[in-house]
């Protein structure tokens, strides 16, 4: 980029990196008793909340930004230093943990940071081997459940409408429009360089509108929009349905993000291990998938104004504002709201569909049905009840797959899972990220050949072990030897 004045010009070089460091501070800092003067303008009013670092200022420029002015808080707290950008928080003593506040201090060596991150990852390998003790619900989880029960409603269409469980008032949110607009323009430039990507992206957004999952905001009502979400796409070529998926970035803003003020909610589905163990006990296995599960649950006004995006089909058109009118995947409470609405449906419709109601509450992991039965007739009845029950709430089950072809006979071709090809020629599907061969009813594992020319290292060994996904521990005799070697 270039900076010009009337009598000279200079060229400035910028280095753009995906991330500069982890969020700073790494933990939220309680500043309630710091007594920061109310008449000063902080360069970062939300410095005490973990945030992404967007810009690194060099040492020579930094000292040019300093001004005369310094405020010393009580012993053990940081100093307030005046700069051309506003007052900044710097330093600190024993009252501030080094892991919870970083300001104007030298960054540790990059190799040390990488090794620390590697050590944390390594510890996780052995921590997941332990059986976790059942924990009581936290106050936030209880509050989130109470909020759902108090605010959910069922629409005439059978769909459920919910409100976002906020910990704080939306007035705590930081400014988000500027960054959303900048990111949108960057997205358009990327699409201009890739017409095929642009076509698929536009088709995805058109479907979003056609399904009434988002709606255009009238220009006179744009003042009601309180939070804007940047968006980008993720390509997943091995998906048998959606190759391109638009992802909304909920954690981006100047200051508090939407996720910062939202409750998470408890995990209310059975543990993955329990679901898979039950699945392996059935003589006849059955799997399915709920299509666009989160988007099957509506978000009631005015909370939909916290989910605004920018979009236009053509660069010649004016940028339009839309609200996302369903639960948005990526928000902190999305999984809880969608699953809780599904469980509420199982309760409300339990009388006509007892088998389906039990399946919804015991044999789903997020949007994946992992089930089966003792006979073809039992599985077909469970399949019918579960599908009919979910349709009462406008949820659609699809991608049916079974270890017995008779179960699938008569189903529309579009609703049956399309198979992937395993390296040995088997037709497989993915069940909770596990490769499953329905014909033989076997779970399969594969590992691509390693590069024999590369130099082995602690990091490369860890990377190799991490490729194994084995929640049931079926290949632990192999993996544990790798872990022992690494340890």
Image: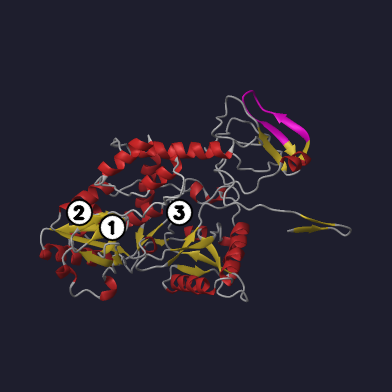
Q: Who's the residue at 54% across and 33% down the image? A: 99
Q: Earlier in the sequence, mark 2 or mark 3?
A: 2
The residue singled out by tag 1 in the image is: 435
Q: Nearer the viewer, mark 1 or mark 2?
A: 1
Which of discs 2 and 3 lies nearer the camera? The answer is 2
Q: Residue pushed farthest right? A: 7
Residue 202 location in percent, x, y?
50, 73
Residue at the spot of label 3: 331
Residue drawn 20% across the image and 61% down it: 286
Bounds of the magenta segment: 68-81
Q: Is residue 60 magenta?
A: no
Report which quarter residue 9 is drawn in: bottom right
Front-most of 402 and 423? 423
**Can residue 38 be seen in this snapshot?**
no
Residue 206, given in percent of the width and then of the height, sits at 47, 73
List the residue tagged with mark 2: 279
What is the CA distance from the residue labelled 2 to the residue labelled 3? 30 Å
Comparing 286 with 114, the one in front is 114
Q: Is residue 202 left or right of residue 93?
A: left
Q: Is residue 84 visible?
A: yes
- Return the residue found at the far front: 453
Asked whether, in this view, residue 302 is left or right of residue 443, the answer is: right
Q: Secondary structure at mark 3?
A: loop
Which structural element holds mark 2? Answer: helix
Neighbour tally class for label 3: few under 14, some 14-19, many 20 plus, Cα within 10 Å: many
Q: Nearer the viewer, residue 94 or 439?
A: 439
Mark 1 and mark 2: Cα distance apart in space: 14 Å
Q: Secondary structure at mark 1?
A: strand
Q: Is residue 69 magenta?
A: yes
Query: Could you tell me how far apart the alpha carbons at marks 3 and 1 are, in whole angstroms?
Result: 29 Å
């Amino acid at each position: 980029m270039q900076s010009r004045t009337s009598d000279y010009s200079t060229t400035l070089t910028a280095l753009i990196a995906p991330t500069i460091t982890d969020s700073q501070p790494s933990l939220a800092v309680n500043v309630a008793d710091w007594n920061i003067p109310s008449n000063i303008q902080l360069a970062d009013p939300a410095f005490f909340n973990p945030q992404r670092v967007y810009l690194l200022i060099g040492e020579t420029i930094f000292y040019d930004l300093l001004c005369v002015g310094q405020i010393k808080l009580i012993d053990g707290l940081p100093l307030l230093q005046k700069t051309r950008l506003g007052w900044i928080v710097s330093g600190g003593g024993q009252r501030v943990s080094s892991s919870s506040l970083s300001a104007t201090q030298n960054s540790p060596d990059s190799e040390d940071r990488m090794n620390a991150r590697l050590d944390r990852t390594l510890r996780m390998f052995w921590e997941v081997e332990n059986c976790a003790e059942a924990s009581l619900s936290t106050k936030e989880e209880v509050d989130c459940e109470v909020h759902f029960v108090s605010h959910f409603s069922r629409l005439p269409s059978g769909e459920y409408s919910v409100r976002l469980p906020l910990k704080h008032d939306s007035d705590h949110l930081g400014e988000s429009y500027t960054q959303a607009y900048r990111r949108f323009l960057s997205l358009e430039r990327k699409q201009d360089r890739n017409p095929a990507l642009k076509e698929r992206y536009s088709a995805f957004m058109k479907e979003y509108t056609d399904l009434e999952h988002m709606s255009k905001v009238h220009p006179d009502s744009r003042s009601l929009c309180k939070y804007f979400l940047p968006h980008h796409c993720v390509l997943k070529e091995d998906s048998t349905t959606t190759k391109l998926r638009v992802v909304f970035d909920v954690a981006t803003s100047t200051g508090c993000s939407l996720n910062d003020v939202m409750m998470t909610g408890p995990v209310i589905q059975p543990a993955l291990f329990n679901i898979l163990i039950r699945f392996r006990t059935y003589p006849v296995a059955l799997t399915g998938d709920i299509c666009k599960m989160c988007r099957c649950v509506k978000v009631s006004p005015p909370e939909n104004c916290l989910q605004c995006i920018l979009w236009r089909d053509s660069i010649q058109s004016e940028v339009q504002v839309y609200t996302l009118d369903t639960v948005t995947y990526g928000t902190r409470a999305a999984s809880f709201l969608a699953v809780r609405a599904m469980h509420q449906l199982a309760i409300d419709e339990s009388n006509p569909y007892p088998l389906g109601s039990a399946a919804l509450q015991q044999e789903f992991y997020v949007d994946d049905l992992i089930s089966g039965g003792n006979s073809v007739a039992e599985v077909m009845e469970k399949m019918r009840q579960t599908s009919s029950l979910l349709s009462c709430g406008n949820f659609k089950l699809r991608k049916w797959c079974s270890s017995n072809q008779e179960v699938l006979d008569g189903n529309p071709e579009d609703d049956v899972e399309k198979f992937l090809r395993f390296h040995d020629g088997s037709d497989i599907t993915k069940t909770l990220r596990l490769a499953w061969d329905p014909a033989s009813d076997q779970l399969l594992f594969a590992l691509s050949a390693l590069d024999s020319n590369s130099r082995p290292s602690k990091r490369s060994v860890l990377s190799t072990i991490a490729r194994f996904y084995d929640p049931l521990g079926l290949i632990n005799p192999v993996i544990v030897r790798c872990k022992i070697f690494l340890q």
